[in-house]
Amino acid sequence: MKNPALFLLPVLLAGQLTGSTVALGQTVVKPTDNLVVEGLPPIPTSVAEGVKRYTESRSAFFTSWHPTKQEMLIGTRFANTPQVHRLTMPMGARTQLTFFDEPVNGGSYDPKAGAYFLFGKDVGGNEFAQLYRYDLADGTVTLLTDGGRSQNDGPTWSPSGSRIAYGSTRRNGGDRDVYVMNPLDPKSDRLVLQVQGGGWGAIDWSPDEKQVLVSEYLSVNESHLYLVDVASGQKTELTPRSETGVAYGGGVFSKDGKGIFLTTDKDSEFQRLAYLDLATKKWSFLTDAIRWDVEQVELSKDGKRLAFTTNEAGVTKLHLMDPKTRQYKPVPGLPVGNIGGLNWHPDNSGRLALTMATARSTADVFVLNANTNALTRWTESELGGIVPSSVSEPKLITWKSFDGKEISGFYYKPGAKFRGKRPVIINIHGGPEGQSSPSFLGRSNYVLNELGVAMIFPNVRGSTGYGKSFVKLDNGLKRKDSVKDIGALLDWIAQQPDLDASRVMVTGGSYGGYMTLACAVDYNDRIRCALDVVGISDFKTFLQNTESYRRDLRRAEYGDEREPEMATFFEQIAPLNNAAKITKPLFVVQGGNDPRVPRTEALQMANAVRKNGSPVWYLEAKDEGHGFRKKGNQDFLFYTTVQFIKQFLLNEAP
């Protein structure tokens, strides 16, 4: 998973500017009732006014083609949350269809007539998403799943469009079983496969609709594939369950149903595009010449075209293949950035929808004509007051870590108007199976253009995109080696004539939040301040309190706290247990409904560091989960982040 600027000012929305008055007669931004604010100073309205033009950009993401018309569904935001919109022509008006207080996930037309679409929605960021049907004739919304404390993902349509397969934790909250349903008749819902573990999911249907391809995800380094008979629920191994250390993804049946196109790092350092013959179990590896991960695979409905993307040092490259000859070539002339959401139009016309973002353009929807390689823009999302030419484009940098391993990252320089050595923000991605890549930074462009702060997004060991050996370098007892990569980055910063090593701030979200806290402990004397967003403060308490459906999946990465050796190691490295070493200002941000990293991780860390007498700011949104998705909350977080940067990184008077 790529993670461009995911958490420095991670997607968050609009605090009310009702003017309370402070002693100096200055109006301040009043936090809304859903926000818990502790230790923060009043935020002057001048801060909100100064950053406003950087908070008004939006994005658009492709979600579904209409099965018979040249129109589509997209996800975008016009008010406080992303919702489903209909788009009937390139650059046409975006017609909003859903109007919920909570963000809506996806939006997938029924493949028969486009009379309805399916979407997912949770409550307050708790990630217990339910599936819904939206009937276009009258706007009626029907709940399809249990509506309780279960997580429902998918859905995956059958070729005829009469059924969906999806995963749900409804049985016990921890195991993700596979169900099949006719969305027009919710009572048809049927358990097809009962499993143990939270990493199961339906990927594709066979052309005859008798089987479903199912994946069992154990970790970024290991997964397994099965064929499941829809009628009987019988499960057949496609990849040996005894096979360890091999990962599979992107599976799709060939048109004739005789094989599967997928990605795998079987016998390879990188994920290759491969074809598995179902009768002979023979593997054909199709992209040996590409020494990067193949990430997405999309086959046209008639089986005559295949599109796939590669991740080349964080930059996405799009390729087209003839599945019959297995010949492929890159699509020329595409901007440097991220490409996702590949989807062929069902009419087999060669139109490929995709979502693309660059450093100077937020995510937008495009359609590629595979016959001519012509790219047509379908959306042009507003950048607010940001001028594209003023946006910094990143430079790929590398440095040697403590063990000689080369680490890389993306360096964004501040505006040219700033002179002298510039302060630095190091923004560490989450995951840890993630990757920072060149993309539009949104609000963070204010930090570059108006505050003159340089930004570096490192891809420390454990990041994806650099081979499976690199991903494993931070596993288990090697956890602190990734923290040492940041220590080596601090050394690199000190050697740069244009950067000020005495003014460094570290930030990150989720696992990047753990990295932030660990750096605040280990490099307290080398940084000015730290901003932790939904971060892990103690792996032991985290693993005990994260939702049960993901607990074993996280143990595969971090280690098992029930084992004595790991328990001792977790005790040693926990930022919580080393909080006394943090004397620099700390800002802790948390979603009150976070199912991944519970709010207890943030509360215990903030309380522990406060005992040192150093400044601790705490901000919690009671209606958010793992990161902020509502614009009002995002905006208020940004205002406070700017104030934190000014006060503690730039030493400006509050």
Image (cartoon, grey):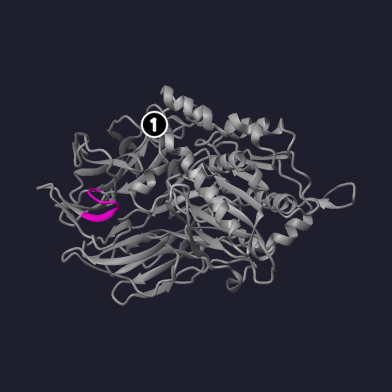
The one of 83 and 560 positioned closer to us in this rendering: 560
Q: Which residue is mark 1?
A: 552
Within-10-Å neighbours for mark 1: few <14, some 14–19, many 20+: many
Q: Relative to 238, is 318 on the left or the right?
A: right
In the figure, 496 relative to 644: above or below? below
Residue appearing at x 26%, y 55% in the figure: 272
**Residue 613, located in which quarter of the rendered image?**
top right
Residue 553 on image: x %, y %: 39, 35
Q: Is residue 37 left or right of residue 194?
A: right
Q: Which residues are magenta?
A: 266-274
Q: How many marks?
A: 1
Compare residues 59 and 113 and report the one nearer the observer.
59
Where residue 419 appears, as percent x and y from the top left, is 69, 68
Look at the image and say whether residue 39 sits in the magenta stretch. Answer: no
Is 268 colored magenta in this rendering?
Answer: yes
* Camera-side residue of 82 and 638: 638
Residue 546 is situated, as x and y percent measured from the top left of the image, at: 49, 31
Question: Dominant secondary structure of the magenta stretch?
Answer: loop
Question: Does any portion of residue 1 appear in the rendered image?
Answer: no
From the top left corner, tell me how far across and down residue 374 is, in percent.
36, 76
Q: Amino acid at mark 1?
A: Asp
Farthest right residue? 24
- Give SS at disc 1: helix
Residue at left 70%, top 60%?
51
User: In the image as oriented, which residue stretches furthest toward the left?
Assistant: 280
- Height in image: 323 above or below 590? below
What residue is drawn where x is 58% and y is 57%?
A: 493
Residue 646 makes an appearance in the image: yes
Between 340 and 451, the residue placed more toward the observer is: 451
